[in-house]
Image: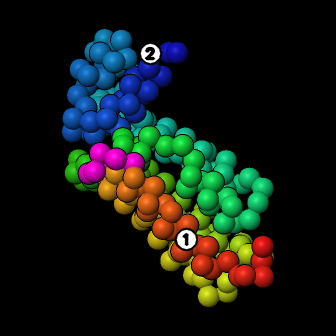
Amino acid sequence: MSTAERLIESTRELLWERGYTGTSPKAIQQRAGAGQGSMYHHFAGKPDLALAAIRRTAEEMRVRAEEQFSAPGTAVDRITAYLLRERDVLKGCPIGRLTQDPDVMADPALRAPVDETLAWLRGRLADLLAEGRERGELGAALDPQATAATVVAVLQGGYVLARAADSVQPFDQAVTGVLGLLAAHVPTTHE
């Protein structure tokens, strides 16, 4: 792995663990095994490196989600697979956690990939839900956009509840709850 790659990967890990404010250039350099000169050779500074790390995390999150979203099955099957996939719940969402970081939210460049990723997720879920409704897998009364926003809010809120309780149970309950709400929109004749 190149020095630039090690710096990006180290920054990604530190942002997830400590947030932007808690991630110092020195900590990045130490974790990457790179000197200060190497860091500033590849990146203009901490904001530039953080942006590269956030973009990489966002892209990987989209790719992982798309694996479930584009798999065979009904819309509910694919959303269920996405919600039930293995996650490091107690660490929280590596993108969602950044919304709680005031320095990230105050910087339009750093905030942009966070907003874009969460908007993509809502949009992709809305598309799946609309597809399910069109195929008769979901009732006509279901609002795909509102339901997609609800799914994302429950997922992100589940992370918060789990971290506060230091237990995955609240996250699992939130996911079970939203899946129950989705199941209520599956017509009884469609099984």
Report the amino acid beneath label 2. Answer: Thr
* Left or right: residue 57 compared with residue 143: left
How many numbered tags mark residues here?
A: 2
Q: Quadrant of residue 99?
A: bottom left
Which residue bears the numbered disc 2? 3
What x and y, as percent, mark residue 165?
28, 51
Res. 59 visible in picture: no
| Image position of 142 with respect to 117: above or below | below
- Above or below, 12 against 134 in this view is above
Q: Which residue is mark 1?
A: 180
Q: Amino acid at mark 1?
A: Gly
* Relative to 115, 46 lies left or right: left
Q: Is residue 156 magenta?
A: no
Q: Give the crowd class for mark 1: few <14, some 14-19, many >=20 residues within 10 Å.
A: few
Give the residue displayed 27% in from the left and 36% down from the top: 18
Where residue 34 sits, quadrant-wise, is top left
Q: Nearer the observer, disc 1 or disc 2?
A: 1
The C terminus: image quadrant: bottom right
Find the distance from the CA under tag 1 to the CA under tag 2. 47 Å
Which stretch appears magenta? Answer: 163-168
How far across and how far down the image is residue 86, in percent?
A: 54, 43
Label at residue 92: none
Residue 88 in the image, given as x and y percentages of width and height: 44, 40
For label 1, the SS is helix
Q: Is residue 180 above or below residue 46?
A: below
The structure residue drawn at horizontal position 76% and vertical position 60%, both measured from the top left corner, is 73
